[in-house]
Image (cartoon, rainbow, N blue to C red):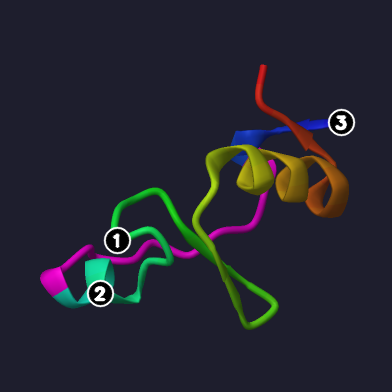
Amino acid sequence: MAPYGKAPYKKVIITAQSFELAPKGKIPFIDYQGNLIGDVFLIIDIANNSAGVTPW
């Protein structure tokens, strides 16, 4: 599995409006296939399953 450094990503500047979009009103959150995911454990699970990366 690839380290996180190899996973595709897009940098986004966090603004007050970004927090309004966040499912839980805080970061981290991701937009995955049109769905906003605000749970860090789900984000890690998605990264593991879809991008083939490991967090450690």
User: In terms of secondary structure, where does tag 1 sit?
Assistant: loop
Residue beneath the point at 75% across and 50% down: 46
Query: How far apart in space, not on screen, are marks 3 and 2 (Cα)?
Result: 34 Å
Q: Residues within 10 Å of mark 1 (few under 14, many from 20)?
A: few
Q: Position of residue 22 (x, y in %)?
A: 37, 67
User: What is the three-letter code of the residue carrying label 3?
Assistant: Met
Q: Residues within 10 Å of mark 2 (few under 14, many from 20)?
A: few
Q: Residue 44 lies in what quarter of the image? A: top right
Q: Position of residue 11 (x, y in %)?
A: 38, 61
Which residue sits furthest front?
A: 24
Front tag of 1 and 3: 1
Query: How far apart in space, not on screen, are marks 1 and 3 (Cα)?
Result: 31 Å
Residue beneath the point at 62% across and 47% down: 43
Does residue 17 appear to the left or right of 54 in the view shown?
left
Q: Position of residue 35 (x, y in %)?
A: 62, 76
* Earlier sequence position, callout 3 versus callout 2: 3
Residue 25, disc: 1
Which residue sits furthest bottom?
A: 34
Q: Name the residue under label 2.
A: 20
Residue beneath the point at 40% across and 49% down: 28
* Earlier sequence position, callout 1 versus callout 2: 2
Does residue 25 appear to the left or right of 34 in the view shown?
left
User: What is the three-letter code of the residue carrying label 2?
Assistant: Glu
Q: What stretch is highlighted in magenta?
A: 6-16
* Earlier sequence position, callout 1 versus callout 3: 3
Instruction: Examine the residues drawn in magenta and state their main secondary structure.
Output: loop
Query: How far apart in space, not on screen, are marks 1 and 2 (Cα)?
Result: 6 Å
Answer whether labels 1 and 2 touch (C-beta < 8 Å): yes
